[in-house]
Image (cartoon, rainbow, N blue to C red):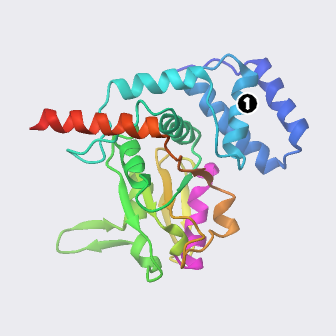
Amino acid sequence: MNKSPIPNQLIEEIYNIQINNHYKVSQLARFIKVTIRIYNKFNLIDFNELTNYSLKLLQEESNIEQPIIIQEEFEKVINCKSLNTSNDEKFYFKNSKKLKQMMVNLYACMIGRIPVCLIGSTGIGKTSMAKAFSYFANENPHILYSFNMETQIDDIWNIFFWAWLSNYYKWSLTKAIEEGKIFISDELNLAEKSILESIAIVLESSTDGTKVLILGIEETINYNKNFFFIVYQNDIKMKGRNELPEIIRKRIKFFEYPILSKEDIEISCKEIAENELEKI
């Protein structure tokens, strides 16, 4: 399939971003990759809007409004799919502006292959959002793994050959990366430094479609371009929570889980009640 050449106007906008931000070569390459992936998916013709949105996705800012065309594309996706967190539990957000914006940003990050981290207090809805997103964004079921201070590197990596089954068994993160699944990581910041260092390399956008050498186990695994990494964690101010190290932070986009307004909560309560009534 022949693809259209990149418009010169888009290259000019990318150049303008570079002039204003003085990116290093690696930073510029990452920005260009994200911009082209989003352009290819949504065919944005306002190149200034496109490049500025890509730029915001790679910066620390977490409250980001999307171009209208991306919101409209997302609406088409969710209107033809049911957003569930499991087979019988739904995630209610469609009428909440803040939650919808968060889901759209997750969608754009997945297209741009930018790993994300959702931060918020316990019970606020981080897990439900991550699960619901994975159900409509990826045909493969997600893999959820809860990290803690006892997690060992062999718990998430390694591939074993079971002779009695004549088959290989892949540990959770290895399986997600090779099969192109969404990997949902609970409290990654509780893991030991060696584990975080082994994970850092697979969070690089430059690993698309290549083999990756995993530190700590010295094994090479195939990287599927559909792999997407979501972290959610409680506020680091809570006792026992550590800040993720720089090697991870610089590869991840952080989003504060939105605090819902009274109107948002009332709308969600109504949706939950109506859905429950239908099941009775």
Rendering quarter of residue 237: bottom right
Query: Is 20 displayed left or right of 185 in the figure?
Result: right
Neighbours of disc 1 within 10 Å: few (<14), some (14-19), many (20+): many
- Can residue 79 be seen from the camera position used here? yes
Give the magenta-colored segment's residue range: 191-207
Measuring from the top left, give residue 20's x and y in whole percent.
89, 37
Q: Given the image, on which type of amino acid does mark 1 rest?
A: Thr
Q: Residue at x 72, y 24 (%)?
A: 49
Residue lying furthest bottom: 150
Secondary element under disc 1, as helix, strand or loop, is helix
Residue 122, percent from left and from top: 44, 62
Instruction: Please state which of residues 24 and 217 is positioned toward the viewer in this rendering.
Output: 24
Q: Give residue 16's quadrant in the image.
A: top right
- Is 77 one of the magenta-colored residues? no
Residue positioned 45% across, 34% down in the render: 96
- Measuring from the top left, give residue 53's x and y in whole percent: 69, 33
Q: Residue at x 61, y 33 (%)?
A: 37
Tell me if 243 is positioned left or right of 218 in this view. Answer: right
Give the residue at x 59% y 26%: 40
Q: Which residue carries the number 1 mark?
A: 51
Q: Is residue 186 above or below residue 218?
A: above
Residue 196 located within the stretch drawn in magenta: yes
